[in-house]
Amino acid sequence: MSGDSGIPVSPAETPAPQHSLRVGRVRLQHDGVLGTIKTLIEIVVVAIFVVTFVVQPSHILTGSMEPTLRVGDFLLVDKQSYAPGGWMDRALLPPQAIHRGDVVIFIYPVDPAKQLVKRVVGLPGDRLSMRAGHVFVNDLELREPYAFYSPGRKNHFRDDFPSLRDADPNVDPLWWVELRKLSLDGEIVVPTGDYFVLGDNRNDSEDSRYWGFVPRAAILGQPLVVDFSVRPVEGPWWQRLLNSLKDGWSSVRVVR
């Protein structure tokens, strides 16, 4: 009788060695360095895919969209909402139509290296004008509960757009020339494939009034949520840190 009564195990059936890490009285099993590296690579690949095709982070640097978006807000932008994509993307997940009142992020027509966030107020074919700072589309005043009018001096170009009575030093020169051709009976018509955008902070926003229309192809996506916010605070460093964390997380909200 053989002294070895065990069942032989083939090399293929030999269990892979596992590594363990003791934390207090608990022993945690892990797959070693190679397993950890593999997991990290998978996380990085998923993160790159999400940032490239689904959402992207963005940061608000000016007050042109206050009070909807404030300086220091960090956004998550939905890149799939308006993305034209290829024919398969359009068949499986067709892009949403852009509606009047949508907040959008787009490539700045004057400087393609920059991206701006504004609100769409004029769609292709709309007849648009402003009177005393209020928007009129196709002869009807646009209801805009989000619009904010900070105190400021009367500005005919800004408030009675497209008024050509006074030139504004902030107007793009090429747009000023084109505007003189587009303006008819105190209004302009938004061309096919273009959009007219304004900042919610109407008296402190350089927008379509100052540099022109936004082409459909330049619109990148729609802000979804403010996921964090940083505000300037005073006091000792530890107090500034605690207040920043508290205010940052309390500012989380959906963008409308």
Image: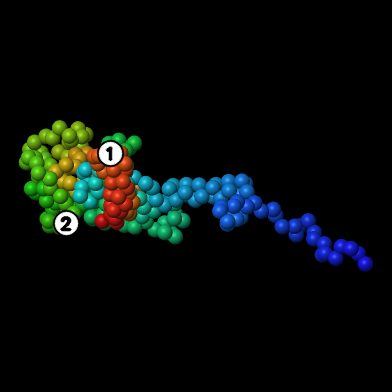
- How far apart are labels 2 and 1 at the CA level? 39 Å
Residue 230 percent coordinates (x, y): 29, 44
- Report if the CB atoms under discs 2 and 1 are less than 8 Å apart: no
Q: Quick check: 47 left or right of 130?
A: right
- Among all residues in the image, which is located at the extreme bottom? 1
Q: Is residue 5 left or right of residue 225?
A: right
Q: Badge 1: few (under 14), some or many (20 or more) residues near its Cα, within 10 Å?
A: few
Three-letter code for the amino acid on which mark 2 is drawn? Pro
Which label lies toward us, 2 or 1? 1
Closest to the observer, 209 or 91? 209
How many marks do you count on the picture? Answer: 2
Q: Which type of secondary structure does the marked residue at label 1 adopt?
A: loop
Q: Residue at 15% of width from left, 38% of height from top?
A: 180
Q: At which x and y percent is residue 218? A: 33, 45
Q: Quadrant of the N terminus?
A: bottom right
Sequence order check, earlier mark of 2 and 1: 2
Q: Residue visible at 29% across and 56% down?
A: 254
Does residue 79 appear left or right of residue 230 in this picture?
A: right
Between 88 and 233, the one lying in front of the other is 233
Left or right: 28 in relation to 159: right
Residue located beneath label 1 in the image = 236
Q: Which mark is residue 145?
A: 2
* Image coords of residue 168 (percent x, y): 13, 35
Residue 5, disc: none
Q: Which residue: 34% across, 36% down?
A: 113
Q: Can residue 185 be seen from the camera position used here?
A: no
Name the one closer to the observer, 161 or 36.
Answer: 36
What residue do we see at 14% from left, 43% from top? 203
For the C terminus, the image quarter is bottom left
Q: Amino acid at mark 1?
A: Pro
Mark 2: secondary structure: loop
